[in-house]
Amino acid sequence: MNIAHIMKERAMLVPLFAALTLAAILGSGLMAGLFFAFSTAVMAALARLPEGQGAAAMNAVNVVILNPVFLTVFMGMTVVALALGARAVFGWSQPGSAWLLAGSLFYVVGIFGVTAAFNVPLNDALAAAPGDAQVWSRYLAEWVPWNHVRTLAGLAALACFAMARQ
């Protein structure tokens, strides 16, 4: 393989990674916006409902949200972030690599990781104890701060992916 061939192959990847970076910006923004809405309005509204109704509504949300559109963005962004993170590591000398790696880490750790480690187990515990006021109170006290982390991680990922395009 000669240098010209390698350069041609690398040039062919430039539009792909540019498209992936744009997808990462949009996907991070969508996720940050969703989490922001829960942090600033939805959870406070559910907490004001009479005992049992807020938990029941949240359980319904947790079922409905597992739909193809949400899962495509949430899981698709995880794949995109991992691909961009790999591109950053293997192309470290390329402009924007540090931003890509940072954005990827914010998304994978701060959104996907936090969701899997904290929010989903809390969702499962809430679903397993319908009408239990103590579980609902604990849920609100623990789920909401972790959702704030996801919101901030989404905003940070968006900003980093945007900076990578500079």
Image (cartoon, helix red, strand yellow):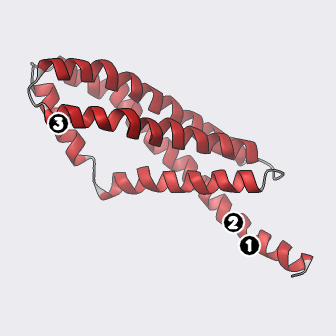
In front: 121, or 131? 121
Q: Quadrant of residue 51?
A: top left
Residue 136 % position (x, y) = 19, 22
To which residue does mark 3 refer?
127
The structure residue drawn at horizontal position 33% and vertical position 26%, both measured from the top left corner, is: 143
Camera-side mark, 3 or 1: 3
Q: CA distance from mark 3 to mark 1?
A: 48 Å
How packed mark 1 is, by other alpha carbons closer than 10 Å (few <14, some 14-19, many 20 or more), is few
Indicate the amino acid at tag 3: Ala
Indicate the amino acid at tag 2: Pro
Camera-side mark, 2 or 3: 3
Q: Which mark is residue 91?
A: none
Lower position in the chain sequence, tag 2 or tag 3: 2
How packed mark 2 is, by other alpha carbons closer than 10 Å (few <14, some 14-19, many 20 or more), is few
Q: CA distance from mark 2 to mark 1?
A: 7 Å
To which residue does mark 2 refer?
15
Lower position in the chain sequence, tag 3 or tag 1: 1
Q: Pointers 2 and 1 in contact (CB under 8 A)?
A: yes
The structure residue drawn at horizontal position 41% and vertical position 31%, both measured from the top left corner, is: 36
Q: Secondary structure at mark 3?
A: helix
In front: 162, or 77? 77
Residue 157 % position (x, y) = 58, 39
Q: Is residue 57 left or right of residue 154?
A: left
To which residue does mark 1 refer?
12
Vertical relation: 14 (above or below) 116 = below
